[in-house]
Image: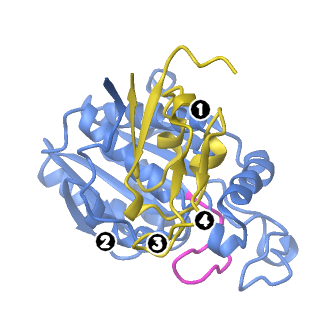
Chain colours: A blue, B yellow
Amino acid sequence: MAVVFKKTKGLTDAQTHYCPGCTHGIVHRLVGEVLEELGVLDKAIGVAPVGCSVLAYKYFNCDMHEAAHGRAPAVATGIKRVRPDNFVFTYQGDGDLASIGTAEIVHAAHRGEKISTIFINNAIYGMTGGQMAPTTLVGQKATTAPNGRDEAHCGKPIKMSELLATIDGAKFVERVTVTTPANVRKAKKAIKECFKLQLEGKGFGIVEVLSTCPTNWGYTPQEALKWLEENMIPYYPLGNFRKPEEVE
Amino acid sequence: MAKAKVRGKVTFQEDICKGCGLCVSACPVNIISLDNEKINAKGYHPATIEDMDECIGCASCATMCPDVVITVERL
């Protein structure tokens, strides 16, 4: 009898605090699996954000650091420059990376910092109770937009991957999702490619993962995946926006 | 129904299951269900399989599980 799937060594035994059906858990596992498969668990340093994944430092089985809201890329920059032989990644949500931390991520990419970023985009502020995020879709309801996001008042949602792909320093930019087993495998492939880029010393890489927030969206986990596929993917198209060979 | 050629065995770590049901909808042979008779340590109905003979060991359930509850073996 051969074991075809078991828990990765990249995660600790701690049980996550995430709501049932939250896709943070899937992405945590993928990051853990990739760190283990690349053999960098002993030299990886992760930077946790503020948001639902604020406790990520308890879940990844490698050295972790906590950053102030949105400042994970700045903290990761410092760590990487002092310890260039370590593997440094940030794990951030959309309320962190696409809002208060926009300056940090844009300039870390612009400087071509040799760090990797996992960006969870679930189009809402999860931890604080479902407020509208810069990534909230037009018409999508949030506690601070009870009638749905109004484009005339708030503008359209920000597309971080497209934005970062215009920056020369960003060598790898890809948007994936985790709605089906096939999409989960594609997401893992993208994360692995992104992490390898850093190990090869090529520069900044980011993987944006379209995720669900069943609790704040007000759906069951299954309905949330369906809502993501029907509403988020048309606005946030999946795919690679930048690869190292295109840059060179 | 003819039994699948490849057989699998799925083990759930029931106590840490949050009963989200993502494995239920991911299973291509529809053998996973939430056990409404049981409540686990977390207070959820954990995922379970009654007819393990139908399992094809594809690991789709484990791939979708956000809480790494599932271990999959192939016979």
Please tell me which residue is depicted at 22% across the width and 61% down the height of the picture: A64
The secondary structure type at the circle numbered 1 is: helix
On the image, the x and y values in percent for residue A39 come to 19, 34
Residue interval drawn in magenta = A121-133
Q: Residues within 10 Å of mark 4 (few under 14, many from 20)?
A: few
Label 2 resides on the chain identified as A
Q: Quadrant of residue A154?
A: bottom right
Looking at the rendered structure, whether the residues under marks 2 and 1 are on a common chain is answered as yes
Label 1 resides on the chain identified as A
Label 3 resides on the chain identified as A
Image side of residue A231 versus residue A224, left or right: right
Looking at the rendered structure, whether the residues under marks 3 and 1 are on a common chain is answered as yes
The mark lying in front, picked from 2 and 4, is 4
Looking at the rendered structure, whether the residues under marks 2 and 4 are on a common chain is answered as no
Measured in 3D between alpha carbons, the distance from the residue under mark 4 to the one under mark 1, in whole angstroms, is 29 Å
Image side of residue A121 versus residue B11, left or right: right
Residue under circle 1? A182
> Tag 3 or tag 2, which sits nearer the N-term?
3
Looking at the rendered structure, whether the residues under marks 2 and 3 are on a common chain is answered as yes
Residue under circle 4? B36
The secondary structure type at the circle numbered 2 is: loop
Residue A65 visible:
yes
The amino acid at mark 4 is Asn
Q: Residues within 10 Å of mark 2 (few under 14, many from 20)?
A: some
Looking at the rendered structure, whether the residues under marks 4 and 1 are on a common chain is answered as no
Measured in 3D between alpha carbons, the distance from the residue under mark 2 to the one under mark 1, in whole angstroms, is 33 Å
The mark lying in front, picked from 2 and 3, is 3
Please tell me which residue is depicted at 45% across the width and 36% down the height of the picture: A188
Residue under circle 2? A67
Q: Are marks 2 and 3 in contact (CB under 8 Å)?
A: no
